[in-house]
Image (tube, rainbow, N blue to C red):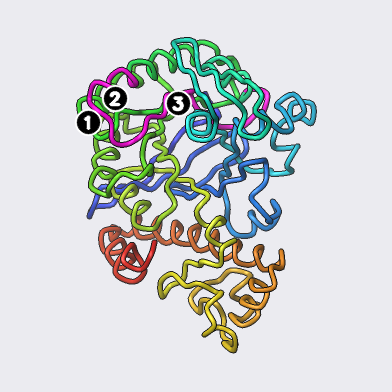
Amino acid sequence: MKNFYLEIKHIDKQTGARYGVLHTPHGDVEVPMFMPVGTLATVKTLSPEELISMGSGVILSNTYHLHIRPGEDIVAKAGGLHKFMNYPGPILTDSGGFQVFSLADNRKINEEGVMFKSHLSGDKMFFSPEVAIDIQEKLGADIIMSFDECIPYPVTHEYAKKSVERTLRWAKRGKDAHKREDQALFGIVQGSDYEDLRKYCAEELTKMDFPGYSIGGTSIGEPKESFSKMVEYSVKYLPFDKPRYLMGIGSIDFILEGIEKGVDMFDCVLPTRIARHGALMTHKGRINIRDAKYKEDFTPLDNECDCYTCRNYTKAYLRHLYVADETFGKRLLSIHNIRFLIKMMEDARKAIQEDRFGDFKKEMIEKYGSKKGF
């Protein structure tokens, strides 16, 4: 694809983390980057204009959920996701595989695909590599995903090996079915925390020459040590000049770990999901705005944050909105959490360009990393 490629501009001398620009049909975005999740063609409670003002580049929507409602044909008639949701920047859709395996009832998997029941209506549905590609072509995102088998953790080597082999066969079928030249189809590396399987999957996908590669099977309850192995074992066997996307990662420590290992793209529902429950990422660690101590706290949420919420509202007001279950409160808290992660990525890119990402990572973890709830 002439209008989709990764331009690597600098490698951090401390860690090997990379800074670059991802060129897409709907604009150029700097990497590494965090992608807000708009599951149903909307990032919950937020407008496209607000996302753009926060520095959002690529946003993600979900194939499974959009297939159920409103249906990909409706989106196609609207002119595709960009017009349907009025987002001018790049959009990524996942294949729906994770939702099929995690949400749907009574799954029956065979070589052709997966038969399952909708988690909403109970209706019987079927996804295959070809079906997933057809839906995503109609949705019209810039970046789309192969349909893979999502396995739990832990599993035996034998189980993971069979799954990898099926994922590779499905990747080939999906690539053969993909016809749109204005979409970049990514292959997905699976293999649990077994290096030989990650190596085999990555190398076989590379032979198929995808425009980019995703790392799947992480953030499903595995310990951090296994997560690190999964990422390392995948990245080391992927092409240097293609984008690398670590799926479903939104915690500070896991994002920084991924960047250090050479990952370019991250996404997660975490910032908006925890915001709706009153949990906030701040430069002093995680806080819960519902706590009584904020009832008369008339200071900004985070003095070091430049988001709309922190520039205009106090903790006391935000707590009031949360306790009163006001939608505006959920919007303000979501704005803060998303901007927090986007700003962190901006700072990470600057640190890479200045050859100090290792120091930056250490400072982040010490200040408000996993020990403080992220």
Amino acid of disc 1? Tyr
The CA span between labels 2 and 3 is 25 Å
> Crowdedness of circle 2 by 10 Å Cα count: few (<14), some, many (20+)?
many
The mark that comes first in sequence, 1 or 3, is 1
List x then y, in percent, for residue 176: 50, 10
Please tell me whether residue 235 belongs to the stretch shown in magenta.
Answer: no
> Crowdedness of circle 3 by 10 Å Cα count: few (<14), some, many (20+)?
many
For discs 1 and 2, the disc positioned in front in the rendered view? 2
Q: Residue at x 63, y 20 (%)?
A: 124
Name the image quarter holding residue 344. bottom left
> Crowdedness of circle 1 by 10 Å Cα count: few (<14), some, many (20+)?
some
Question: On the picture, is 372 further left or further right than 134?
Answer: left
List x then y, in percent, for residue 171: 43, 18
Question: On the picture, is 213 further left or further right than 192?
Answer: right
Residue identifier under label 1: 194
List x then y, in percent, for residue 342: 50, 57
The mark that comes first in sequence, 2 or 3, is 2
The mark that comes first in sequence, 1 or 2, is 2
Amino acid of disc 3? Pro
Residue identifier under label 3: 211
Q: Which residue lies furthest to the left in this view?
A: 196
List x then y, in percent, for residue 13: 24, 52
Is the Cβ of the residue at disc 1 closer than 8 Å to that at disc 2? yes
Report the span colored magenta.
137-164
Disc marking residue 160: 2
75 or 15: nearer the viewer: 75
295 or 306: nearer the viewer: 295
Amino acid of disc 2? Ala
